[in-house]
Image (tube, rainbow, N blue to C red):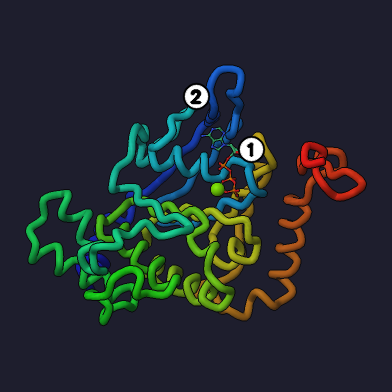
Amino acid sequence: MSGHERRAHGHAEQGRIDAEGVFIRLGQGAEAFEAVQDVSFTVPAGEFVCVLGPSGCGKSTLLGALAGHIAPAHGALTLDGAAISGPHPDRGIVFQHHTLFPWKNVRDNIAFGPKMRGIPKAERHRQADEILELIGLGGFAGRYPKQLSGGMQQRVEIARVLVNHPRLLLMDEPFGALDALTRMMMQELLLDIWTRLRTTIVFITHDIDEALFLADRVLVMSPRPGRIVEDITVPFERPRRAEIVAEPPFGRLKRHCLDLLRPRPGTDTLPRLSPLGAPPHAR
Ligand SMILES: Nc1ncnc2c1ncn2[C@@H]1O[C@H](COP(=O)(O)OP(=O)(O)OP(=O)(O)O)[C@@H](O)[C@H]1O
Ligand SMILES: [Mg+2]
């Protein structure tokens, strides 16, 4: 058992989220609006939760609040009972596009967090190499980000967060820019890592297949202002087989999600097109 697995073992009770009546306001003055409205949910320690919703419904805003980048206007947001009041390496976040330092190699990118926490060089390099093995990039420590494929860059990005032993792994459409095949491989890799570490994961996506393949639970959000319209427990057994996405029970649950996400008649928020197909201001 590696140091990471041991640690995860000893802290299995860490990583519980409680959101109670959370409202998040964005914009200033007359432009201010509620991006997230009255959201309540609980994530037990070690659970894998996906947040599914249409573009602009407030998913990233909610994740930003969990990361501690945005404060709710009302309500309580806690991790293991303590209010989330600012960013912390305990709550690592991975975005759609990598934020690796182009001038640092893979090992130094991963070791940057430990470096900031004052961990000596030999030890932080050891930690980086251990994580590189975990994500299947053992031979790539000396490479630079631009020498890696998109999938590998995202793996390093995940490693950079995991090296801090987070209680909470926050992911904002982390595989959204990858091709379909790489994306599938990344989903399986993430499930494999999660099975070993049991870090609580909140994963945002607008891809129904991705949500149902990965999650224990899917929180479905309504269009803006974002509210949780359904909390779906995903019944598929683990470890998840890639084939389940082509089987009838998966199809039925997917259809249910589609019905939840499809805009109701009369509530379509897309800009209206003129008869010529151009938006009015473009004519
Ligand atoms: N800093 C900001 N100031 C004003 N409005 C903002 C700001 N950030 C986001 N918004 C708006 O708030 C709403 C919610 O944005 P958010 O990024 O959380 O949505 P999302 O669900 O993550 O969308 P997507 O799926 O496109 O990433 C959107 O209508 C967006 O245009
Ligand atoms: Mg977003």
Q: Residue 124: which disc?
A: none
Amino acid marked by disc 2: Ala
Q: Residue at x 59, y 54 (%)?
A: 218
Q: Residue at x 23, y 61 (%)?
A: 7
Q: Which comes before the other along the chain, label 2 or label 1? A: 2
Residue 218 can be seen in this image? yes
Label 2 sits on residue: 73
Label 1 packing within 10 angstroms: few (<14), some (14-19), many (20+): many
In the image, farthest residue toward the right? 275
Q: Residue at x 39, y 73 (%)?
A: 152
In the image, farthest residue toward the top? 29
Q: Quadrant of the C terminus?
A: top right
Amino acid marked by disc 1: Arg
Could you tell me which secondary element the residue under label 2 belongs to? loop
Label 1 sits on residue: 227
Left or right of 69: which side holds 271? right
The answer to whether mark 1 is within 8 Å of ligand 1 is: no
Q: Nearer the viewer, residue 229 or 209?
A: 209
Residue 105's quadrant in the figure?
bottom left
Could you tell me which secondary element the residue under label 1 belongs to? loop
Ligand 1 falls in quadrant: top right
Left or right of 122: which side holds 36? right
Residue 9 can be seen in this image? no
Above or below, 116 against 121 in this view is: above
- x%, y% of residue 179? 56, 73
Residue 77's quadrant in the figure?
top left
